[in-house]
Image (cartoon, rainbow, N blue to C red):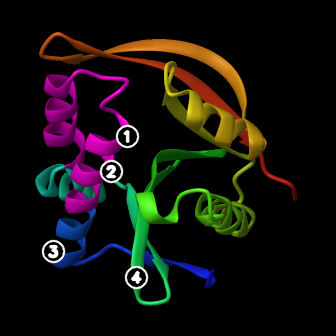
């Protein structure tokens, strides 16, 4: 596989690409974990083009994964005082289990060292066994459990996982 590059999302076209990837990836990946109504609701609230544009204005950074000239997924981060929140990390089906997430994480660690963050943390659905196993493999550990009401009768029932950044 080619080297992964992270392309900052800044244009309306890139935002639409993120929203399109989100719809495809979420419907493939979460169908066994969440009911379809919650998937639709969460996509509209958190991953639609309007939601992504709003998050960019609020200080989130989005990046498309590029492998050669192909889009392999995307991530979103939000810098905080001492740590980096990995809000989203989604890999397209054809690129899963090919080192894409690991390459993205290595680049995030470099960013953390440059910008002075001590750790990276994320939230992951408690029933998302495959992603939890992948995060464990990448050095993340569970530090907290949380249930957050996201409206419309839905909750996010998550583990918070964190990984210290090597200096």
Name which residue lies at 40% across and 61% down.
61
Q: Is residue 97 left or right of residue 17?
A: right
Mark 4 lies on residue: 70
Predominant secondary structure, magenta span: helix
Residue nearer the viewer, 16 or 72: 72
Q: Is residue 160 left or right of residue 88?
A: right
**Image quadrant for the N terminus?**
bottom right
The percent position of residue 31, horizontal first and vertical second, equals: 30, 31
Residue 29 is marked as 1
Name which residue lies at 33% across and 73% down.
9
The numbered mark, 4 or 1, whose residue comes first in the sequence reads 1
Q: How far is disc 2 from disc 3 in space, using C-alphas?
A: 20 Å
The percent position of residue 17, horizontal first and vertical second, equals: 23, 69
Residue nearer the viewer, 34 or 142: 34
The numbered mark, 3 or 1, whose residue comes first in the sequence reads 3
The numbered mark, 4 or 2, whose residue comes first in the sequence reads 2
Q: Are marks 2 and 3 in contact (CB under 8 Å)?
A: no
Q: How far is disc 4 from disc 3 in space, using C-alphas?
A: 18 Å
Q: Is residue 62 left or right of residue 136?
A: left
Q: How far is disc 4 from disc 2 in space, using C-alphas?
A: 16 Å
The percent position of residue 94, horizontal first and vertical second, equals: 45, 64
Q: Is residue 139 above or below residue 152?
A: below
Which residues make up the magenta segment?
A: 19-47
Q: Is residue 141 left or right of residue 10?
A: right
Q: Is residue 51 above or below residue 64?
A: above
């Amino acid at each position: 596989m080619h080297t992964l590059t992270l392309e900052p999302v800044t244009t309306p076209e890139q935002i639409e690409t993120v929203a399109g990837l989100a719809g495809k990836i979420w419907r493939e990946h979460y169908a066994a974990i969440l009911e379809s109504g919650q998937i639709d609701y969460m996509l509209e609230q958190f991953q639609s083009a309007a939601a992504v544009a709003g998050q960019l204005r609020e200080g989130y950074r989005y990046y498309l994964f590029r492998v050669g000239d192909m889009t392999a997924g995307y991530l979103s981060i939000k810098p905080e005082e001492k740590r980096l929140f990995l809000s989203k990390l989604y890999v397209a089906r054809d690129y899963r289990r090919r080192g894409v997430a690991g390459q993205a994480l290595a680049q995030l660690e470099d960013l953390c060292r440059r910008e002075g963050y001590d750790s990276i943390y994320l939230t992951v659905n408690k029933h998302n066994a495959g992603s939890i196993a992948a995060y464990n493999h990448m050095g993340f550990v569970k530090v907290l459990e949380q249930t957050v009401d996201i409206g419309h009768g839905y909750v996010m029932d998550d583990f918070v996982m964190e990984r210290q950044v090597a200096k």
